[in-house]
Amino acid sequence: MKRTAFIIVLVALFTTIPAFAGKGHKCTKPVQTCLNDMVAKLKSTGFIGVELDDEKKHGGKLVVTKVIEGSPAESAGIRAGDELFALNGIRFNEKNHKALKKVKVPGKTVTCTIKRNGVDKEFKIKLVPMPADMLAKYIGEHMMEHSQAATKVAKK
């Protein structure tokens, strides 16, 4: 998948979505177990409504490629090209996974810091549960990756 879809609080981004989207992570769980785990994580993670470009293309930066129509991100004024930088003052990076996980709860209002044209901007955003159509999209994409991986193994 070329884009990391964002659930955010944004951070599911560094954690939940990249893991499910296959970014440097190969899911080795049985399909049903993977599906159950993914649904549980996505349903309990606050959603902001952005898709992100592959961090590798931007030196580890989380660059917004798309803002989902009608999402909290759109209402807040986040735009494509913005770099997601921090949530409630906690920078997005692997070291801060646990701290970010605590704030990515549906219903919680958070302060999202972005960088736009080199300038920091802060937005108050109320995280929402992931819409069913987005949940289905992300799960479908991941299950296709499972299927393709199983096909490759079977051909060997």
Image: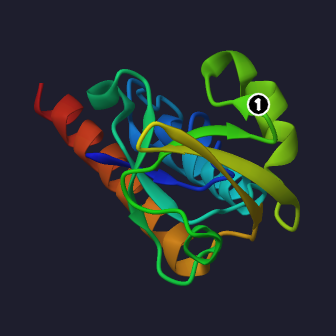
**Three-letter code, disc 1:** Ile
Q: Is residue 43 left or right of residue 145?
A: right
Q: Is residue 153 above or below residue 124?
A: above
Which residue occupies the extreme left position in the image?
Answer: 155
Image location (x, y in percent) of residue 26: 41, 27
Q: Is residue 46 left or right of residue 117?
A: right
Please give the name of the residue rendered at 80% of the width and 27% of the height, measured from the top-left corner: 98
Residue in the image at 75% along x and 70% along y: 128
Q: Quadrant of residue 102?
A: top right
Residue 30 in view of the camera? no
Residue situated in front as seen by the camera: 22 or 87: 87
Q: Left or right: 154 with respect to 91? A: left
Q: Give the residue number, with chain letter if any, for mark 1.
A: 90
Local secondary structure at mark 1: strand
Label 1 crowd (10 A; few <14 / some 14-19 / many >=20): some
Count the numbered circles shown. 1
Which residue shows up at 41% across the image and 43% down it? 117
